[in-house]
Amino acid sequence: MKKVVKFGGSSLASAEQFKKVGDIIRSDKTRRYVVPSAPGKRSSNDTKVTDMLYNCYNLAACEKEFTNLLDEIHARYQEIIKGLGLTLSLDKEFEVIQENFEKKIGRDYAASRGEYLNGIIMAAYLNFTFIDAAEVIRFDEDGNLDSEKTNDLLSLRLEGEKYAVIPGFYGAKEDGTITTFSRGGSDITGSLVARGVMADLYENWTDVSGFLIADPRIVQNPKSIETITYRELRELSYMGATVLHEDAIFPVRKVGIPVNIRNTNAPEDKGTLIVEGTCRQPKYTITGIAGKDGFASITVEKAMMNSEIGFCCKVLEVFERNGISIEHMPSGIDTMTIFVHKDTFEEKEQQVLAGIHKAVNPDHIELESDLALIAIVGRGMRSTRGTAGRIFSALAHAHINVKMIDQGSSELNIIVGVRHDDFKNAIRALYDIFVETQI
Ligand code: ASP
């Protein structure tokens, strides 16, 4: 049995947090490969080390004084080292970083030092081997991850290492240029390492006990999700439920390794298990509810539209030409409605309208903005009758008008469109009917 464990920035923000992490790792000998983030915020008004590094490098890049800020960053690490009672010194490392900043070696290099230095401390604290991610995470010339090469490098390098620390968030191109993932990318490193060693489990430790059924900023104390499939997760993350970096799913999913989201501050909680498939019926008909605001809809109406071959295609081409991505597309016999993000649409609105008129000569085009979409997601819906009925009666009771309905053919989700003003109430009403009253 082997597990890969990734710890986020808030789990490693101070010596006190490091100690919790140390206890978690030492309590289970199968937790063999550790992927740390850079130190995060110690309190809500604190700054993440990654952000400090970006700021510091910006100063260096414009040839401004940057060493004071670099000293502050050094002090953050020093505080952790001291708090853990280690005799480690990072002086040499900081000399090299300063030289490289003076040479303006690159923003990615700068940001990556957060995880690199935290990895050195973590390895010393646990007495594990430190492996620089630049050796094992490979990016191509254009800065995209080379996942197959990375997999080969990781499995080869880790074959002989029983216990190792591999810093998250960065890797290198063939020529050694340090490259990072997008923000939050240590999740991806953890997933790649899990695939590389064919781990039994990828544990992703953060500051929440997994995914919640609904957004806690909207629903008070929502229950957490025990088990979720990758497909359900995809639907919910698209709608904005984020705990895990989206790209972290692919490497482990490919080889069927489950991911367990856990809470460093409440290690007794089981968290959420993300799996490819499961026979376990969810506790409630739905697994989760998530929503996004800021949509606009364009309804194109033309009599006998259904018999006009290529009608939809011509309309869609207009959006493509204007670089607007389409989010949803419910249709009627003589109408088709296109949901888009309001912000991107607004800039091109008149070009799109003119384009549609030219392309299909419609009878009427109607625009509506300030719409929100809510996804009600759950594998349990497939085997339960009346889910849609319950959704609509819950919304009707809450006096909410449904502007659009879309049920995917997988029967995994139902999406409803509501007005922006009804958004939060709609989520509360849905949570209430499916979770609180459990019918
Ligand atoms: N430290 C990086 C960030 O703040 C990467 C990570 O934490 O995963 O985005």
Image: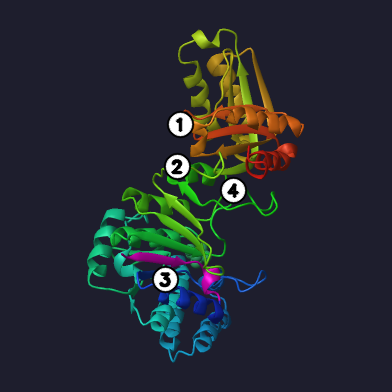
Residue 437 lies, with reference to residue 95, above or below; the image says: above
Measured from the top left, where is residue 153 in percent x and y?
25, 63
Quickly name the residue at label 1: 410
Which label was assigned to residue 105?
3
The alpha-carbon separation of the residues under discs 3 and 2 comes to: 40 Å
The alpha-carbon separation of the residues under discs 1 and 2 comes to: 10 Å
The residue positioned 59% from the left and 18% from the top of the image is 357
The residue positioned 43% from the left and 64% from the top of the image is 169
The alpha-carbon separation of the residues under discs 2 and 4 comes to: 15 Å
Q: Is residue 229 magenta?
A: no
* Label 1 lies in ligand 1 vicinity (Cβ under 8 Å): no
Quickly name the residue at label 2: 231
Quickly name the residue at label 4: 213
**Residue depth check, mark 2 versus mark 4: number of the one nearer the observer:** 4
Ranked by sequence position, the earlier of labels 1 and 2 is 2
State which region is magenta.
1-13
For the residue marked with disc 3, what is the amino acid? Ile
Query: Can you tell which quarter of the image residue 34 is in?
Result: bottom left
For the residue marked with disc 1, what is the amino acid? Ser
Using a 10 Å C-alpha cutoff, classify the residue at mark 4 as few (fewer than 14 neighbours), some (14 to 19) or many (20 or more): many
Ranked by sequence position, the earlier of labels 2 and 4 is 4
Ranked by sequence position, the earlier of labels 3 and 1 is 3
The residue positioned 70% from the left and 32% from the top of the image is 395
